[in-house]
Image (spheres, coloured by chain):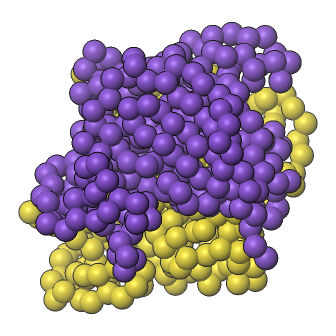
Chain colours: A purple, B yellow
Amino acid sequence: MRYIRFLDQSGVEQQGVVEGHVVKGTMGNIFEEIQYSGEVWPLHDLKLLPPVIPANFYAAGVNYSRHLESVAKKKGVPFELPKQSHIGYRSPSALTGNETPIVVPKASCGRLQFEAELVAVIGKSARNVSEADALDYVFGYTIGNDVSERQWQAADRTLWRAKNCDTFKPMGPWIETNVSLESLTTVVRMNGEEVSRFRTNDMIFGVAATIAEISRFITLCPGDVIWMGTDEPTLDMVAGDIIEIEIDGIGILSNTLIAERD
Amino acid sequence: MRYIRFLDQSGVEQQGVVEGHVVKGTMGNIFEEIQYSGEVWPLHDLKLLPPVIPANFYAAGVNYSRHLESVAKKKGVPFELPKQSHIGYRSPSALTGNETPIVVPKASCGRLQFEAELVAVIGKSARNVSEADALDYVFGYTIGNDVSERQWQAADRTLWRAKNCDTFKPMGPWIETNVSLESLTTVVRMNGEEVSRFRTNDMIFGVAATIAEISRFITLCPGDVIWMGTDEPTLDMVAGDIIEIEIDGIGILSNTLIAERD
């Protein structure tokens, strides 16, 4: 099933299930029980919202060895595989949906980089779960673009504005519940041209290991999201660029960069 | 006015306004319009919840010069006043209310430290607001204990488990809307004995400056919280310790450390 959130033609927030080219409206908490409302919309007409607004927004850092190697090289430090997951946080205020603009802040130098990420959406409360059981707590998967302003990332003590400006966290287009992790490939296209391709599940710490590790200390809640990190390359984008992240079997997340207006 | 959230005797979540020793029940969104429900409870009977669950949870780091000096000394680096706010994030999953336990995780060495913090609660959507106008966007203030596991803080790449384990973010007892920042003093007591006292508003970057700075990049939303950092000392606590943070004019946040059970 593919769960989406969207604004209908009157600008009212709605939720639904995608079936081919139509969306069947639903009511209720998607993590508990939903009912069909009887309303149906054509999918292409809708302004999509992030498919979930998480209470807690986790991001696994430097979680692919090629990306880690590249970061180490830029910093001039030796490359070592990490011994444990690097869990960070992002802020829900930065989320935006599929086919909405990524706004380049006036104060930025104008160059942002994409990071193409698999996103696991938690479906059930999880504390102290084993790696073997962890995937039972996943509701489904979506796609995230962990947009990063590298000058701020290098200059600031934290990632707050480098990664959390308004619109810096496109997520979508929907939550797909029927996913086989091993079969996924992530492809990034800029202005229609393929610029990155990697095996999605080639993470250093996979979805199950990350859920198990977080849940040793923290209760994961329905709707929480874990962004699983990106592989290389992560390239500059400037205003006007269209950036598409496709994970086959999930969908395509597409956003265009625009400059902030005065 | 003092706004609280609590569980009533039947375990149902309620909200209300404190007047002396009683709580008058309210309905509606406290950032828009509330109505009195007509219900009244004695304050001392209630199990308090964090007075708000923020969508976005900000924390200003190293924001008092004595604390910064001490951190620099421990790291063996020269002490310099920062040129800009250090904004970080915490996770709502870690929040707990007044008079609830702080649970020391089994995997911890057993020593946690308190950090006594003023918390500003945003009342209105804020983007690109000036420092002069910024306090108009504050709904009120409460108290936070930014509980920290220093071994994990030193060992991990991020603060995720050092500062965000379940129960590591006590907040409360309520939101006080009538506060004069300049007159506030923060006092910390451990097991009844005063161990720290500082002028609350002696921050390097004050509430107004921090709101203005965040709002240059990010839309602050009603209910978002900004924890304003702590001054020295921050001391070890172990299971059994009772830690009280008082900010005169706001209230007292009291929590007891307990060990996680098997």
Q: Quick one: B75 or A116, which is closer to the camera?
A: A116
Depth check: give the residue in front, B235 or B131: B131
**Nearer to me, A146 or A164:** A146
Q: Going 81% across and 34% down the picture, which residue do you hit?
A: B73
Image-based side of B200 in relation to A215, left or right: right
Residue A81 seen from this side: yes
Which residue is pictured at 32% across the width and 63% down the height?
A42
Residue B20 appears in the rendering: no
Q: Is residue B62 above or below residue A167?
A: above
Residue located farthest toward the left when viewing the structure as drawn: B10
Residue B164 image offset from top left, x and y in percent: 47, 40
Image point 39% across, 17% down: which residue? A182
- Residue B235 place in picture, x, y as percent: 58, 39
Would residue A96 appear left or right of B15 to someone viewing this image? right
Q: How many marks?
A: 0
Residue placed at 64% from the left, 46% from the top?
A243
List x then y, in percent, for residue A71.
75, 24
Which quadrant would residue A29 be assigned to in this image? Answer: bottom left
Residue B166, picture quadrant: top left
- The residue lying toward the viewer, choosing from B181 and B91, is B91
**Quarter of the figure that contains the C terminus of chain B:** top left
Q: From what the image shows, is residue B135 above or below residue B211?
A: below
Instruction: Answer with left or right where residue B25 lies relative to residue A153.
Output: left
Q: Quadrant of residue A183?
A: top left
Q: Quadrant of the N terminus of chain B?
A: bottom left
On the image, the x and y values in percent for residue B53 come to 39, 61
